[in-house]
Amino acid sequence: MAKGKTKRIKGKQMRHPATLDWDFGATGPANQQGLVKERLADIDGTGTIKRARRVDMLEVWHKRGWLSGEAWDMAKKLRDAFEGTQRSQGADYERPRVDRSPKPDCAVDIQIDRLSRYRAITSHIADDDRSVIIRCVINGRAPEGRGQEAVRAGVLGLSQALERTLSSTRGEVVR
């Protein structure tokens, strides 16, 4: 454990807490990764409204032009369908809470609908494309390879895989 500093001010001995050199908190480099600071508006010249939001690599690749617009749309649909399977049923805090077991049929139906939507989209992914799509879209990781050219080639392959998936879903309605 780190020792704090002791300082004398006007004859009194003051103790200051120790500072930790490894703890950067919310402003540390680990928390800044994927964080974009944007200027939203300047109201009446009094000040600028700013916000910070997280962007994933799919959005970065789309803005760079490495992912086509169709591939970007398909990736968002796939990611939203996957994230829908990870959510639980919402709670209505307006209604009084009663200590009883809820009606399970409704919750099960909602979860089945979410899984069915994800399954409907993933059933169109070709076996050769499945690993790169799962790696980049679902897990949020970069394609295999080192260096910018290898990653760019991997993103181009991802874009083509997503476009093939989209073209195989053309006959069906994918929300």
Image (tube, helix red, strand yellow):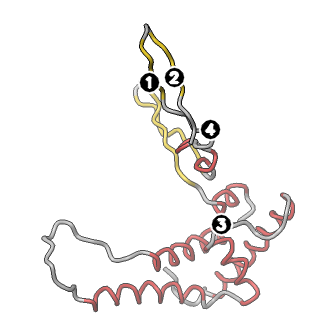
Cα distance between the residues tagged 3 and 4: 44 Å
Decide: few, some or many residues near mark 3? Use Cα within 10 Å; few <14, some 14-19, many ≥20: some
Say above or below: 38 vs 154: above
SS under mark 2: strand
Name the amino acid, label 2. Answer: Thr
Q: Count every numbered label the image shows and give the total.
A: 4
Name the amino acid, label 4. Answer: Asp
- Counting from the top left corner in percent of width and height, residue 160 is at 75, 76
Name the amino acid, label 3. Answer: Gly
Nearest to the observer: residue 69 or residue 3: 3
Q: Mark 3 vs mark 4: which is more N-terminal?
A: 4
Residue linked to disc 1: 45
Nearest to the observer: residue 118 or residue 142: 142
SS under mark 1: loop
Tell me the quarter of the image containing the N terminus: top right
Residue linked to disc 4: 21
Q: Nearer the viewer, mark 4 or mark 1?
A: 4
Q: Mark 4 vs mark 2: which is more N-terminal?
A: 2
Q: Mark 4 vs mark 1: which is more N-terminal?
A: 4
Marks 4 and 1 in Cβ contact (< 8 Å): no
Cα distance between the residues tagged 4 and 1: 39 Å
Residue 161, image quadrant = bottom right
Residue linked to disc 3: 69
Q: Mark 3 vs mark 2: which is more N-terminal?
A: 2
Decide: few, some or many residues near mark 1? Use Cα within 10 Å; few <14, some 14-19, many ≥20: few
- Counting from the top left corner in percent of width and height, residue 87 is at 42, 75
SS under mark 3: helix
Say above or below: 99 vs 145: below
